[in-house]
């Protein structure tokens, strides 16, 4: 038995030595190869990566201006114009001087200076920009410039090595390396409420100044346009998929903008709670939260509360799917849209239009009924509340207090929200709201239609038993 153990341990030891030597052999072969690939890529592509320096004039008011807050218009002697400078990156994709960068790098710039690796400087001009994708095309007057190859972001695989080159903090042609961490990320754009879609995520270091630079695969092809970071996060950067840019470059160059179709509705995803209130058992589709006056949907008699099920016989899964489907159609096209309304399906023909523009005190009244609590207080609408919260609605009731940790807070309600309906019943006073809410049982979901910042949306709130 002892002999068998010795044989067993000897076999394990020999296997360990074999795999260790094999690993060293693999590392000795592969690592130098990888070590050569990155410098080779950098040498080849760096001449096509440019620094983009911008300046624009801003008017500022002296903080020492006496009594300045009391003037409706600040006197000119207390104002002065100062230049604001910005830095970013771009890359040449056509040898006759066409450069891709981020829209936010060049937006509003009075002057754009483009600097190449060899030190040559050119004045740049924005010939096309799109805020929805954060992509811009800058033109310089030059010929026979070195260019980068545009790859295929759809075939890029999560986990593959990527290289980022840019101008972080003005440090020209800084190279970082990482992997493609994820695809299809949605990235919010600051306080604007806009959300950029379908971004690539990488752990290659991206810092201020990298914006507009290329994210490259190991073939030296551009698969993304570096554009965003999450402040204070480590190893989390984002890039616009290059296929998104390729789909709009011709329009940016020829028209200066991207022409998109517009349906004219505000939409939200369908949850089981919301679907139940509309007699709809599914969770696919997009719920019409509001219909924009004089828009294509309004002209076709869409209604708030319609659930859009399909467009031209293509089933709609969620709001993003609907947006992408509408954008794939041309302004002027007619679309047959199937909706769920009042318990049945209905098909509406709508003519799409071009999207022109891409870019709201009395003591509170406790409205908690005898049976349930929503975790909020409301009030009648008054001029003081309209001014305090910045809304113009004259019908409905106003949320004036949210209970921390309560159902209303968990549902995302805020003070200043105007409640127009509860469970699809219009309410114009606190008493009307209480009358409807008294029919709700503990554990039920109340569907509130609210108005916020000029838009309406449905919010499901789980009613809890009154303590």
Image (spheres, rainbow, N blue to C red):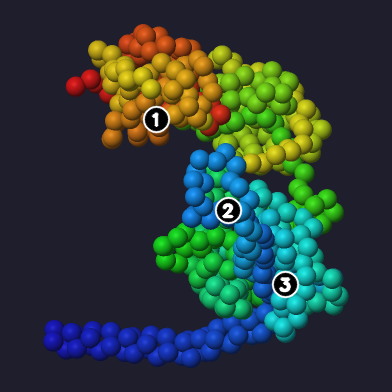
Res. 243 in view = no
Which numbered circle lies on residue 78?
2
Residue nearest the viewer, comparing 394 with 305: 394
Viewer can see residue 332 = yes
Q: Is residue 9 left or right of residue 174?
A: left
Instruction: Mark 1 or mark 2: name the one nearer the start of the chain.
Output: 2
Point out the tag, 3 or 2, that comes first from the N-terminus. Answer: 2
Q: Residues within 10 Å of mark 2 (few under 14, many from 20)?
A: some
- Where residue 41 appears, as percent x and y from the top left, is 64, 81
As helix, strand or loop, the secondary structure at mark 2 comes to: helix
Q: Which residue is mark 1?
A: 415
Q: Label 1: how many residues lie within 10 Å, few (<14), some (14-19) or many (20+)?
A: some
Q: Position of residue 15 (x, y in %)?
A: 33, 86
Could you tell me how far apart the alpha carbons at marks 1 and 2 are, in whole angstroms?
A: 37 Å
Q: Nearer the viewer, residue 399 or 7?
A: 399
Position in image of residue 427 (x %, y %): 45, 12
Identify the residue position indicated by label 3 in the image.
114
How far is the residue under mark 3 from the one under mark 2? Answer: 34 Å
């Amino acid at each position: 038995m002892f002999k068998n153990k010795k044989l067993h341990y000897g076999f394990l030891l020999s296997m360990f030595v074999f795999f260790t030597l094999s690993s060293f052999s693999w590392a000795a072969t592969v690592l130098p190869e990888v070590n050569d690939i990155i410098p080779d890529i950098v040498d080849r592509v760096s001449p096509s990566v440019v620094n983009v320096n911008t300046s624009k004039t801003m008017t500022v008011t002296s903080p020492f201006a006496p009594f300045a807050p009391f003037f409706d218009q600040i006197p000119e002697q207390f104002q002065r114009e100062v230049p604001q400078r910005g830095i970013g990156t771009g890359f040449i994709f056509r040898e006759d001087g066409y450069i891709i960068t981020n829209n936010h790098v060049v937006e509003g710039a009075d002057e754009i200076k483009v600097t190449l690796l060899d030190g040559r400087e050119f004045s740049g001009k924005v010939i096309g920009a799109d805020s929805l994708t954060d992509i811009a095309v800058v033109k310089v007057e030059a010929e026979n410039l070195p260019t980068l190859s545009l790859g295929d972001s759809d075939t890029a695989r999560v986990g593959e090595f990527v290289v980022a080159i840019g101008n972080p903090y003005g440090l020209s042609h800084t190279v970082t390396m990482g992997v493609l961490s994820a695809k299809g990320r949605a990235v919010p754009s600051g306080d604007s409420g806009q959300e950029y879609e379908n971004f690539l995520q990488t752990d290659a270091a991206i810092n201020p100044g990298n914006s507009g630079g290329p994210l490259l695969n190991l073939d030296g092809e551009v698969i993304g346009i570096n554009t965003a970071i999450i402040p204070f996060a480590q190893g989390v950067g984002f890039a616009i998929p290059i296929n998104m840019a390729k789909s709009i470059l011709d329009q940016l160059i020829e028209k200066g903008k991207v022409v998109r179709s517009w349906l004219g509705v505000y939409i939200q995803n369908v949850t089981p709670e919301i679907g139940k209130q509309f007699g709809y058992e599914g969770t696919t589709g997009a719920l019409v939260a509001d219909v924009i006056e004089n828009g294509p949907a309004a002209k076709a008699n869409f209604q708030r509360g319609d659930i859009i099920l399909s467009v031209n016989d293509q089933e709609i899964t969620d709001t993003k799917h609907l947006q992408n489907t509408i954008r794939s159609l041309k302004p002027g096209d007619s679309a047959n849209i199937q909706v769920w309304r009042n318990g049945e399906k209905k098909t509406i023909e709508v003519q799409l239009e071009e999207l022109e523009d891409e870019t709201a005190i009395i003591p509170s009244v406790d409205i908690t009924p005898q049976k349930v609590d929503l975790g909020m207080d409301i009030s009648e609408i008054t001029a003081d509340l309209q001014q305090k919260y910045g809304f113009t609605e004259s019908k409905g009731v106003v949320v004036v207090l949210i209970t921390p940790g309560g159902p209303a807070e968990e549902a995302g309600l805020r003070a200043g929200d105007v409640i127009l309906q509860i469970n699809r019943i219009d309410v114009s006073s606190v008493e009307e709201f209480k009358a409807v809410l008294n029919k709700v049982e503990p554990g039920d979901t109340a569907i509130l239609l609210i108005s916020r910042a000029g838009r309406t949306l449905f919010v499901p709130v789980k009613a809890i038993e009154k303590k």
